[in-house]
Image (cartoon, rainbow, N blue to C red):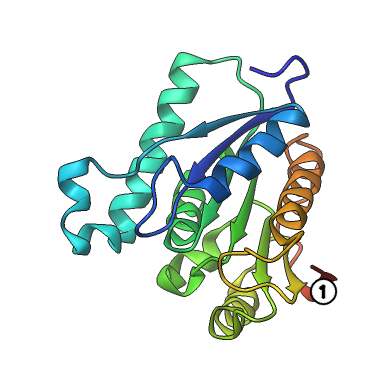
Amino acid sequence: MPVVHRGTVVFAHGSGSSRLSPRNQAVAGALEREGFATLLFDLLTPEEALDRRNVFDIALLARRLEEATRWLRTELPEEKPLGFFGASTGAAAALLAAADLGEAVSAVVSRGGRPDLAPAALPRVTAPTLLIVGSRDTDVLELNRSALGLMRSNARLEVIEGATHLFEEVGALERVADLASDWFKAHLSGGTSRNRGSEGARSTPG
């Protein structure tokens, strides 16, 4: 646990990845340095992961996130506010779990996410949501723009100029971490208004 504890961020990795994802590990490290506790875990058992259908079973992945959230609340009943950070398909699971859990989730950040895989959940998400996409990840960018229009919560799309899907470009992942940190600082305090409607997209240099 960090010395200054702002809240806890639970990570949901994308397809073909795990709790050891170097990108999520890097973002988690940055969040920890800013005073957040983080939880990274495998959404599937090794046996389940062998079946590719499970990797894209968003309802199953969301249930695992919900179970982890309930476990946190049971084990740490005095815990600070909680947020989700989802990548790729994990972002769809995070949005579905956030919709189901309602006020238990204070904020969501999606990195290169696939919100189109949980379309029915998007209008039900009440947590402030930040969608981060690279400008060169063109197909996913269009999917996120469409998803933004379906969301009724305080939602924003940030476009990192020059970045691709994995944010491997110099400075791109650091920008993701900065944006996520700022979003969680603003919205894990409990003082944020919900249901404000969608906000416009912004481009940021990568």
Q: Which residue is mark 1?
A: 202
Give the percent coordinates (x, y) of residue 190. Answer: 75, 35
Q: Residue at x 69, y 54 (%)?
A: 128
Does residue 102 appear in the picture of this structure?
no
User: Where's residue 73, x and y in %?
Assistant: 49, 23
The answer to which image quadrant residue 140 occupies is bottom right
> Which residue: 54% across, 85% down?
139
Badge 1 crowding class, 10 Å Cα cut-off, few under 14, some 14 to 19, many 20 or more, is few
Q: Nearer the viewer, residue 99 or 72?
A: 72
What amino acid is at disc 1?
Answer: Arg
Residue 161 lies, in percent from the top left, at 77, 75
Residue 26 position in % (x across, y down): 62, 43
Q: Residue furthest front?
A: 170
- Whether residue 162 sits left or right of residue 138 in the image: it is right
Dividing the picture into quarters, in which one does residue 143 lie? bottom right
Whether residue 21 can be seen here: yes
Q: Is residue 2 above or below residue 26?
A: above
Question: Looking at the rendering, in which quadrant would you find the C terminus?
Answer: bottom right
Q: Residue at x 73, y 43 (%)?
A: 184
Question: What residue do we see at 78% from left, 31% from top?
Answer: 34
- Does residue 141 appear left or right of residue 14 in this picture? right
Q: Secondary structure at mark 1?
A: strand
Q: Quadrant of the N terminus?
A: top right
State left or right for residue 149 relative to residue 52. right
